[in-house]
Image (cartoon, grey):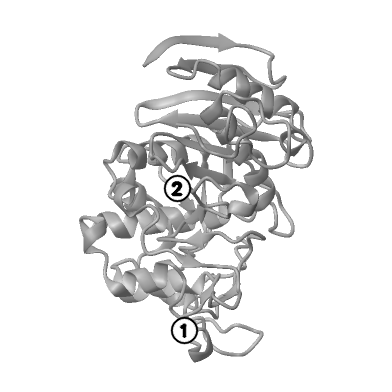
């Protein structure tokens, strides 16, 4: 039960913090605020960013940390590329068009948990030009006519050597959109309104800077948060699809996996990760970190969501940096305990057992 809303100024030094104290853990908010403003994984290397925690009814706690080179904070309304976080939104669109998680086909699963063998696009999500199509209009199908300069084969090529193995590649999503949806010949300018119209009617449409379903979205943390709210409240069928049909992602004697950008042994489900590596006290949250630093999640009980909204230019390795801060915020919120270390403490006395 939410008992009180407060507006705090100056705690994070860049913008107002909107605070809702939630029961039965009244210290969740203070522990989260202390973690985001004092833990080095949140204060070093990932600034500036907007962050938010909420549930199916809206925002519970939010703030802005740090300033950009022009002296501006990142806000809920700041536009940015979300990179691979787009995979979750495309997958949510697919599940919604199917009518339920139970209606997802075997082909959907194969493509959306990245074992389909369509691995010739790579993970280049640079809006400068992975997928301007061949022709007068940029579409998914036109994108797939392009050749990968590394091997001279088109993006539509299915590699027999990667079929059945987890291989992190945008080609799974691009080819799925062409083969199993009606989006293949849709101009990129129309993709955002179509998808947002199904996931969050009335919200500001995304912009697809290129017709790349796995990473072409430019939007705001606020718009993404609305979709997360709909996942949590169950109005999107992605709520049912969270964590289903997971595949392992770290190659080992017992895991068929070829390529992962995450340096931990998580699983991958329908367009999203399951953060379940016990070595790092993984709590099983569902998430989709983007290579430029955008990091949305839903907690494993599906009771609330969170996000860190930031976007770095250059090499796309910023997503896991955001994860390291974000999962500490999640642990602080869950336990009411400030997180001072580098991996979550999931119990109030240092015990590594989640308490919810």
- Location of the C terminus (image quadrant): top left
Q: Residue at x 52, y 62 (%)?
A: 210
Q: Residue at x 66, y 52 (%)?
A: 320
Quadrant location of the N terminus in the rendered image: top left
Write down the quadrant of residue 236 in the picture. top left
Tell me which numbered mark, 2 or 1, is placed earlier along the sequence: 1
Name the residue that disc number 1 marks.
Answer: 163
Q: Is residue 340 above or below residue 253?
A: above
Q: x and y percent of residue 128 in the render? A: 64, 63
Query: Could you say where residue 98 lies in the image, as x and y percent from the top left?
Result: 23, 60
Q: Quadrant of residue 298?
A: top left
Which residue is at 49% across, 32% downward? 355
Residue 126 in the image: state x and y as whole percent: 63, 62
Callout 1: helix, strand or loop?
loop
Name the disc covering residue 39, or none. none
Residue 340 in sight in this render: yes
Name the residue beneath numbered marker 2. Answer: 206
Q: Quick check: 43 left or right of 82?
A: right
Pinpoint residue 168: horizontal percent, then vertical percent.
55, 70
Closer to viewer: mark 2 or mark 1: 1
Q: Tell me the SS state at disc 2.
A: loop
Q: Are marks 2 and 1 in contact (CB under 8 Å)?
A: no
354 or 294: nearer the viewer = 354
How far apart in space, not on screen, are marks 2 and 1 (Cα)? 32 Å
Q: Residue at x 48, y 86 (%)?
A: 157
């Amino acid at each position: 039960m939410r008992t009180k809303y407060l507006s705090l100024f100056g705690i994070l030094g860049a913008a107002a913090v909107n605070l809702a104290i939630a029961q039965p853990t009244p210290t969740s908010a203070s522990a989260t605020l202390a973690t985001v403003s004092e833990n080095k994984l949140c204060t070093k290397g990932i600034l500036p960013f907007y962050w938010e925690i909420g549930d199916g009814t809206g925002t519970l706690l939010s703030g802005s940390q740090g300033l950009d080179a022009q002296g501006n904070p990142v806000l809920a309304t700041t536009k940015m590329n979300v990179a691979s976080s787009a995979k979750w939104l495309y997958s949510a669109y697919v599940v919604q068009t199917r009518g339920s998680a139970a209606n997802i086909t075997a082909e959907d699963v194969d493509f959306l948990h990245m074992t389909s063998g369509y691995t010739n696009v790579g993970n280049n999500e640079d809006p400068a030009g992975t997928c301007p199509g061949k022709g007068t209009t940029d579409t998914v199908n036109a994108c797939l006519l392009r050749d990968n300069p590394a091997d001279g084969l088109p993006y539509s090529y299915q590699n027999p050597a990667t079929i059945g193995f987890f291989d992190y590649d945008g080609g799974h999503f691009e080819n799925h959109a062409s083969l199993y949806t009606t989006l293949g010949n849709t101009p990129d300018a129309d993709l955002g309104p179509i998808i947002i119209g199904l996931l969050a009617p009335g919200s500001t449409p995304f912009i697809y800077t290129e017709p790349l379903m796995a990473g072409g979205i430019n939007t705001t943390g606020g718009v993404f948060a609305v979709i997360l709210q709909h996942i949590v409240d169950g109005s999107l069928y992605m709520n049912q699809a969270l964590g289903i049909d997971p595949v392992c992602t770290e190659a080992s004697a017992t895991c068929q996996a070829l390529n992962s950008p995450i340096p931990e042994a998580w699983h991958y489900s329908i367009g999203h990760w399951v953060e379940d590596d016990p070595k790092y006290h993984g709590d099983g949250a569902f998430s989709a970190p983007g290579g430029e630093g955008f990091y949305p999640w839903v907690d494993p009980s599906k009771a609330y969501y969170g996000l860190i909204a930031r976007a770095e230019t250059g090499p796309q390795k910023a997503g896991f940096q955001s994860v390291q801060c974000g999962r500490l915020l999640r642990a602080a919120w869950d336990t009411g305990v400030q997180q001072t270390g580098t991996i979550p403490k999931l119990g109030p006395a240092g015990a590594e057992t989640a308490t919810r």
